Structures are given as structure tokens and as C-alpha cells.
Image: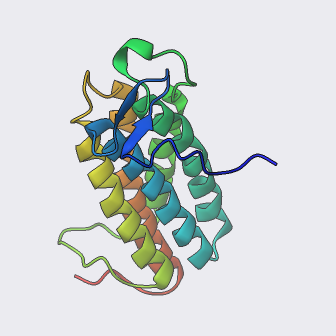
Amino acid sequence: MTKIYTKTGDAGQTGLVGGARVPKSDARVHAYGDVDELSSSIGLARSLLDDADLDGVLAQVQRDLIPAGAELATPFGARGKTAALEPVAIERLEGAIDLWQAELPKLDRFILPAGTRGAAALHVARAVCRRAERHSLAVPGGAPPAVLAYLNRLSDLLFVAARIANQRAGRGDEV
């Protein structure tokens, strides 16, 4: 049986793709850790939603976050050793945003991140996504541009998804 624990991180260091060891407080570790938390937040939101359309898009987002996190865990000089986030992933987000926005009333005021449990969880995921984006900007050598664009667009998708979840549940936006 393979054990899940390695004990190699007991002293506060972790390994990156390519074998380099860095402190767990490294900016890169914060960035890909936030992406992991983001995927978990989306998983929680999925468990609270009863909408096959939203679930399908969010499941694909979780799959897209795997190569995004791997790219963030790869030092600049070792890039190319992991699967890259495909540009079509950003196009999928934009397509879903456009489709869902067509269902929603125009927004001309700020809204509270509230509503159904699923919508509230999507708002939390959106906030985690914004943090992941901010921390990705601090990655040594720079984060891959596709990852930054994906995270930026994903926060928009999560905002619109929360509004859609509320609307489809018969709840409007809380201004």
C-alpha cells in the first residue's frame, strides 16, 4: 500500500513540479493553494445546487483548474513539464457567461453576495477566485498569461452563475 504521507514537508518545505523545494510560504505555493481552495469551493457550491446546466459548467471548471494549478506549481524555467491550460477553456467561460447573462435582468447597482445556499457558495468561490488571481500575480517569473486570463474570466462566470442560481430558484438580486 502506498502511503499518502511522505514526511518531506514536515520542516515547512514543499516540492514544485521539476523537483525544486521551496518554503510553504512561497508566493507560488500561495497561488496554487488558492486554486486548490477555489476548486474545493466550487465543489461545495455544486453540492448545494440542483441545476444540471450549472453543474456541467462548474464540473468542467474544476477540470480546467487542474492544469492551471499545475502551471502555477511549475517554476518558470521548468514550464512545459505539465499540461497547459488550453485557450478554449477561456472561450468556454465566455460562452457560458454570455448565455447566462441573456437570462438575467440588467444590473445597474451593487448586489449583496447572498440568496440561496448554492448562490452564496458561488459568491464565496468568486471571492476565492479573486484571491487566487491576486496571488498568481506575485508568482516569481510571472504566472502564465492564460492562467491569469482564465482566473479573471472565472470570477465573472462565478458572479453570473450566482445570479442565475438565485433567479432560477425564484429569488432576485439583493441590492
Q: Nearer the viewer, residue 16 or 150?
A: 16
Residue lying at the far right in this picture: please name it: 1
Asked if residue 113 is positioned above or below residue 129 in the image, the reply reads below
For the residue pair 93 and 62, the one nearer the viewer reads as 62
- Which quarter of the figure has residue 66? top right
| Res 113 quadrant in image | bottom left
Left or right: where does residue 107 sit relative to residue 121?
left
Q: Which residue is painted at 50% across and 54% down in the image?
A: 99
Tell me residue 39's x, y (percent).
Answer: 50, 55
Residue at 59 percent across and 54 percent down: it is 57
Q: Residue at x 54, y 70 (%)?
A: 44
Q: Position of residue 146 (x, y in %)?
A: 39, 28
Q: Nearer the viewer, residue 41 or 13?
A: 13
Which residue sits furthest left?
A: 109
Residue 173 screen position, x and y as percent: 32, 80
> For the C terminus, which image quadrant?
bottom left
